[in-house]
Amino acid sequence: MLQGDYYPAISTYKNAKVRLNFGPKFRYSPRGYEFKPMSRRAEDMSVEQTMADMKYFTEYDGHLRLDSFPMES
């Protein structure tokens, strides 16, 4: 099995119908796997973004550099 986080998802073919439960309260929890509800991804994302911002501002002494951003005319 590949390492990493897996989040519940589904793919359908033709006229298939499904009911989805992305958590955090699963009716039928996956067995034999570590899993997280989709709502956890939002929490993880905010931590990742905060860490990226801290790294950026540390590298550039707290200054936002706009000269490296492409600007539309």
Image: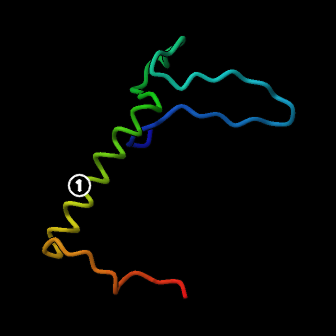
Give the residue type that dot 1 points to.
Met
Taking 27 as reference, is 32 above or below it?
A: below
- Spot occupied by residue 28 in the image (x, y as percentages of width and height): 54, 12
Q: Is residue 67 left or right of residue 71?
A: left
The residue sitting at the right extreme is: 15
Q: Position of residue 65 (x, y in %)?
A: 28, 80
Q: Nearer the viewer, residue 43 or 19?
A: 43
Image quadrant containing the N terminus: top left
In this rendering, the answer to whether 9 lies above or below 67 is: above
Q: Residue at x 49, y 22 (%)?
A: 23
Place residue 24 in its image quadrant.
top left
Residue under label 1, please give it: 51
- Quadrant of res 19: top right
Q: Badge 1 local density, few (<14 within 10 Å), some, or many (20+)?
A: few
Q: Residue furthest front?
A: 73
Residue 49: x %, y % from top left: 31, 54
Protein image colouring? rainbow
Element under label 1? helix
At a point 80% along the width and 36% down the height, the residue shown is 13
Q: Nearer the viewer, residue 18 or 6?
A: 18
Instruction: Pick the residue in front: 40 or 7.
Output: 40
Residue shown at 81% from the left, 28% from the top: 16
Q: Is residue 47 above or below residue 22?
A: below
Q: Quadrant of residue 14?
A: top right
**Numbered label tally:** 1
Nearest the viewer among 36 and 43 is 43
Image quadrant holding the C terminus, namely: bottom right
Residue 19 higher or lower than 46, as above or below: above
Residue 10, horizontal then vertical, whole percent: 65, 34
**Residue at image point 20% right, 75% down:** 63
Left or right of 21, for residue 47:
left
Q: Is residue 73 left or right of residue 47?
A: right
